[in-house]
């Protein structure tokens, strides 16, 4: 008898695999929001470990990824035909989210600069 492995007709390589299901564009947008939050949290925690001080004024900066994710969701849902309210609602939501994100970013960066003596 040979020590070579025998062919098994039910081996995992021969079984049909289920079709691959990719993430929707909305899920991908929110995954990038999660990546942005992890980068912010990592930098904040690293600063705390290095200086033993908590950053003041980080709140407005933490709103920016969520607002941009909401704007991206409005645009992507409109493009998929799932948006409620049509084009005017898409434009209104996107413009409001971007405006709020810019305001929060400006206020947050101004307050964060005070932590570094700026």
Image: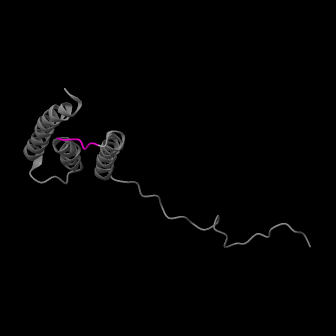
Residue 77 x %, y % = 21, 50
Residue 58 x %, y % = 20, 42
Of the pair 49 and 22, the residue shown nearer to us = 49
Quarter location, residue 36: top left
Quarter occupied by the C terminus: top left
From the viewer's perspective, is 17 left or right of 8? left
How was this image coloured? one colour
Q: Residue visible at 16% across and 42% down?
A: 60
* Residue 82 on the magenta segment: no
Q: Residue visible at 57% across and 66% down?
A: 16
Task: Decide whether the magenta segment is chiefly helix, strand or loop.
Answer: loop
* Residue 54 on the magenta segment: yes
Quarter location, residue 88: top left
Q: Residue furthest front?
A: 52
- Tell me the magenta residue range: 53-57
Residue 84 x %, y % = 12, 54
From the viewer's perspective, is 113 left or right of 9? left
Quarter occupied by the N terminus: bottom right
Figure check: 71 above or below 7: above
Figure check: 10 above or below 51: below
Of the pair 19 and 42, the residue shown nearer to us = 42
Q: Residue visible at 31% across and 53% down?
A: 27
């Amino acid at each position: 008898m040979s020590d070579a492995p025998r062919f098994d007709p039910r081996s995992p390589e021969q079984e049909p695999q289920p079709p691959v299901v990719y993430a929707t564009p909305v899920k991908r947008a929110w995954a990038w929001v999660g990546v942005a939050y992890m980068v912010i949290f990592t930098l904040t925690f690293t600063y705390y470990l290095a200086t033993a001080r908590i950053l003041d004024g980080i709140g407005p900066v933490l709103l920016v990824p969520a607002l941009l994710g909401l704007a991206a969701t409005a645009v992507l849902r409109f493009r998929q035909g799932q948006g409620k309210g049509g084009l005017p609602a898409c434009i209104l939501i996107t413009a409001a989210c971007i405006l709020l994100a810019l305001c929060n970013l400006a206020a947050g960066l101004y307050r964060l600069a005070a932590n570094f003596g700026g």
